[in-house]
Image (spheres, rainbow, N blue to C red):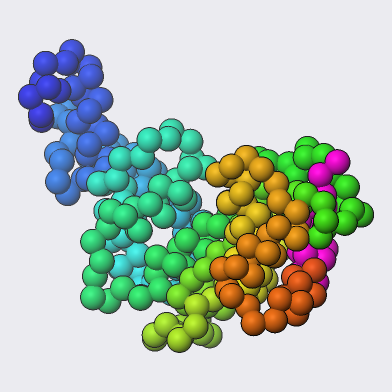
Amino acid sequence: MPKEQKQLPEFQQVQYGFAGHLRDPDGVKKPEGIEDRRMKVYRDLFYNNVENFCANSFPILRELTEDTKWHQMVRQFFSDYRALSPYFKDISKAFLDYLSNHRQSQDDDFEFMDELAHWEWMELNAVSDTGDILQYPHDRNGDLYNSKVVVSSLAWPLVYQYPVHRIGEAFIPEQAPEQPTFLIIARNREHQVDFFETNAITYRLLEIFQQAESQNNMQLTGQAAIEQLQQELNFPDPEQLIVGGKQVLQDLLERDVILGVNL
């Protein structure tokens, strides 16, 4: 027991020992005077709750991962990771952070594991986000090209090396394709989550709108966003980009990625 814990009242020392043993039963002895049969009930209960939550939050990753390896990952997460939130709903985000930023990779890991975990968490996050897109005033029938565009706060442009939305038992890629995969995931006004594969231009156009709002607290017109895209790409046919850009704006409106124009 660490020195600072030995200075605590006895009941707190027991609490620390109890919790430490539950997290790491192989590395931390159970508190004296507690029957192991009783401790096993708590060991199984706590671990199984966390493991079930991780498995349900990342079903494809769980499906593809061999049992021993999966339980090894979850056990290490349970033992070593120090989550800052006390809420069960945040376990999935903590497990994603553990996989991506704290766990040491192994030779038998899928190359796409971190990306797949992130994608599965994004699907969960889109469902559980407490935001409401209808709280933002907007005109759904406005001129998207000449007026300031209102983008949904529940829309996320994503780019991955692997086609994570297709990965499953029937498709396990061995190496990344030459071209990245661009995806947009959003929750519409009927509270349904929708995602679709897109291209680099559509991905960047949505990103331009979102960056202007998050960095400068300003909304752009469709024209301003397309002009910025033209400058970045040095597109050889500006008129073609304008025509294509207007169609993209309309397509994103129909999917509630764009909500309309500012009133």
105 left or right of 192 in image? left
Vertical placement of 186 versus 135: above or below?
A: below
12 left or right of 204 in image? left
Please provide percent x and percent y for residue 214.
Answer: 58, 44
Q: Residue at x 22, y 39 (%)?
A: 21
Answer whether residue 218 is visible to the viewer in this image: yes
Please provide percent x and percent y for residue 234.
Answer: 59, 75
Q: Residue at x 46, y 49 (%)?
A: 93
Please provide percent x and percent y for residue 142.
Answer: 89, 53
Residue at the far left: name it. Answer: 3
Residue at the far top: name it. Answer: 9
The C terminus is located in which quarter? top right
Vertical placement of 119 versus 149: above or below?
A: below
Q: Could you say which quadrant of the image residue 241 lies in?
A: bottom right
Front one among 232 and 54: 232
Answer whether residue 203 is visible to the viewer in this image: no
Q: Residue at x 31, y 73 (%)?
A: 109
Magenta-tinted stretch: 247-263
34 left or right of 168 in image? left
On whether residue 98 falls in the magenta region, the answer is no
Vertical placement of 106 versus 222: above or below?
A: below
